[in-house]
Amino acid sequence: MTEPVAELTVMLVAGEPSGDALGGQLIESLKATSNRPLRIVGIGGQHMRAAGLQSLFGLDDTSVMGLREVVPRIPRILRRVREAADLAVRLRPDVVVMIDSPDFTHRVAKRLKRLAPDLRLANYVAPQVWASRPKRARRMAQYFDHVLCLLPFEVPFFEKAGLPATFVGHPVIERAPAPGLGVAFRAQHKIAENQRVLVVLPGSRLSEVRFLWPVFKDAIEQTEQRTGPLAIVVPTVSTVARRVKEAVAAWRPSAIVTEDAAEKWSAFDAADAALAASGTVSTELALMSTPMVVGYRVGALTAGIARQLMTLPPHITLVNLILDRRAIPEFVQEACTADNLSRELVTLLTNPTARLAQVVASGEAIKALGLDQERPSMRAARAILALADAPREESAPHAQLPLR
């Protein structure tokens, strides 16, 4: 009589919407790759839950950034760190994967490594310590067993610090829909073929929206003085949707605001240009060949402390980091002004040569991230399953899941 195949328990921990999107893709690939029944538990949002995650809590408490927003929530964040680590101690998963959001997930990893040092811990989406805090890589090697890198040059950097690493490619390349959705988007929203469309993306955190929306709004108004009226589309996510909708309604009720992920891609395809916060969305825009201007701001105190504690990278946009040049116009902190953003937007909206140069550069960078190769989430899934099968010093029965 054939013995039943043992169930494999994988714990995933995300801290914000971008990590939740990555986690959703990863879960689907884990289910497609594993030859054992899977139990997926941990912390995630709507994408991971839809893919089958049993989540201990959502992302409202952990998706924060900037001192003004973080400080009041420190007790709740630390409680969430303890709850996540304690859950892993009770469940004894075969592998634990921390997805992005290092300010939250690395705290969970450190606590878990102290409480259960035999558990296998992986980091999916390595923080850019190679650009700002190289010594942090050696510290990561003390509490992670493996790191899954989105960029090819990260692997030798982490291995030199004593942390095994695998290049898996950037999961954003899996998300793009079939081309041609922009025409349908314009028709659905009654946008004329010759009407310029500007996609505006002020961030996925409340702190980002608070600091970026006023300057983005002013930049758009300045741009329209030189280009004429623009059709404004504002894709957003659940963590900031209410704030974004209120801000847009108070400014321009005719603007299109959408929370739908599929419609976001359609808007990218329909857009002539984008004004975006730095982050994963800039890579999504590059994948869709949507010319963009990138801006980013945090509070003055947060910026001052950051400058004291770390060496800031020469670029913040992934396309620029990969190409090691300023292919995408980007403006950070004091340079993130309406004048600067508007000047570059006008260029993209009126100069076909500038648009083409950015599209070509984006294509070059996206290819370096693994386009036309095996799906990154499949590579990541295989690496995680291999780590789960690695010998452990000791094992214990999996506990019952106290999740909702």
Image (cartoon, grey):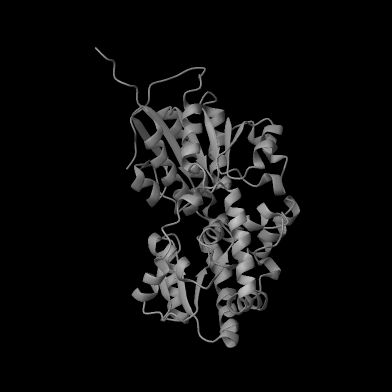
Is residue 400 visible in the rendered image? The answer is: yes
| Furthest residue in direction top, as rendered | 1
Q: Quadrant of the N terminus?
A: top left
Q: Looking at the rendering, which quadrant does residue 207 occupy?
A: bottom right
| Furthest residue in direction left, as rendered | 1
Left or right, 214 with reference to 263: right
Q: Is residue 11 above or below residue 119?
A: below
Q: Position of residue 44 (x, y in %)?
A: 42, 46
Is residue 62 visible in the rendered image? The answer is: no
Q: Nearer the viewer, residue 257 or 77?
A: 257
Q: Nearer the viewer, residue 161 or 246?
A: 161
Q: Position of residue 302 (x, y in %)?
A: 66, 59
Q: Position of residue 307 (x, y in %)?
A: 73, 56
Q: Is residue 7 above or below residue 348?
A: above
Left or right, 385 with reference to 150: left
Q: Is residue 65 above or below residue 350?
A: above
Q: Nearer the viewer, residue 342 or 250?
A: 342
Q: Position of residue 135 (x, y in %)?
A: 73, 40
Q: How many marks?
A: 0
Q: Quadrant of the C terminus?
A: top left
Q: Residue at x 62, y 31 (%)?
A: 164
Q: Residue at x 37, y 25 (%)?
A: 398
Q: Is residue 311 above or below residue 39?
A: below
Q: Looking at the rendering, which quadrant does residue 336 occupy?
A: bottom right
